[in-house]
Image: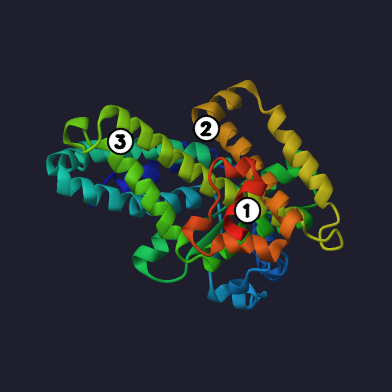
Amino acid sequence: MQIFNQNVAASTGRSLVPPGPRVPATDAIVEAEGLRAAAFTAAEHVAELSKLPAVQHWDATTIANDVDILVVDRPGWISGNAESLQVMLNPAFQQLEQQNPELVKTMGSGATAAFSGAQVGSVLAFLSTKVLGQFEPYAAQARGGNPRLMLVAPNVMMIRDELNLDAEDFQFWVSLHELTHVAQFAQAPWLADHILSIATEYLTTNLLPVAESELSADEKKERTGALEAQITGVMSLLEGHANVIMDAVDPSMVPTVKVIRERFDARSSKIKWFGQILRKIFGLDAKAKQYKQGQSFVSAVVDRVGMDQFNVVWQQPEHLPTADELHDADAWTARVLG
């Protein structure tokens, strides 16, 4: 089912996105190979720091059995996300088609799908300049094979040069964060479906007309708020946990880890006014605050009970922290660990 025209989305995004730092081809190759090597090297350190049983076998060789590590440019990231977004939206539109086939037929028509594709491409073009890396499991579920980890080389290079950071240290630091996401989904094989089910219900709740919904307008608003809180809680946990792991690396491995974190955090306060407006439109500032709260939650739990006990969070959906518990680590510990 075509929800938006994927080819239009990818071509629109590629035509709009700035290319990133302009460097000689040889330098670009060295950058890409260095980033890829850092990811493979980081695998065993993610296993050691996270203490997640599902990835204790990881090293620079075995990581390739669990995930495809791709170093991409911005257009490559756009194309990959146009594909995965189509896959993620499909369950919601299948449900809508059963309830309101005419609505879905209209949304999936040629002109409408092309327009939607152009809108998707415009958003992806903007986001592709902000993302350092992304773990993406959904396209792999649809076509079979390993999930993929995309590392966006021009963005890593741009921020590294902007903040005057050590190249190898920054590549390794970014890789620790992104591989932690791979480890999370490996430890919690139910997690991808859980996130997708929340997103699917959110879409169907909001796209189905009130007249055809089992919910009143007030109930719809309340349910939408609850679903938003759930997805915010999950994403805050995932990002917060990844930040804890990347910052826990031994300084002997990443000597400038504290410098990287200080400069990386300070960077957000120096974004120019137009960038700040765009970040507000796309909710990036709000997300950054939520992820900081997730990091505080994970750090607090680990400080109280240790990483092994914290990892109970990955056993089942009921162990995920609620929105309130993200602000109260003791409440989560009491509920889940007793």
Label for residue 313? none
Residues at discs 2 and 3 in contact (Cβ within 8 Å): no
Tell me the residue at 54%/41% (across/down): 323
Tell me the residue at 31%/28% (across/down): 218
Using the rendered image of the protein, determine whether residue 323 is visible from the camera's viewpoint: yes
Tell me the residue at 66%/47% (across/down): 329
Camera-nearest residue between 332 and 153: 332
Dot 2, how many residues are within 10 Å of its Cα: few (below 14), some (14-19), or many (20+)? few
Q: Disc 2 or disc 3, which is closer to the eye?
A: 3
User: Where is residue 15 drawn, in percent x and y?
Assistant: 44, 39
Using the rendered image of the protein, determine whether residue 21 is visible from the camera's viewpoint: no
Label for residue 283? 2
| Dot 1: element | helix
Q: Disc 1 or disc 2, which is closer to the eye?
A: 1
Q: Disc 3 or disc 1, which is closer to the eye?
A: 1
Tell me the residue at 49%/52% (across/down): 76
* Amino acid bearing label 2: Gly
| Dot 3: element | helix
Q: Is residue 84 left or right of residue 330?
A: left
Residue that badge 1 annotates: 334
* Amino acid bearing label 3: Asn
Q: How many marks?
A: 3
Dot 1, how many residues are within 10 Å of its Cα: few (below 14), some (14-19), or many (20+)? few
* Image vertical order of residue 111 relative to residue 254, above or below: above
* Amino acid bearing label 1: Ala
Residue that badge 3 annotates: 206
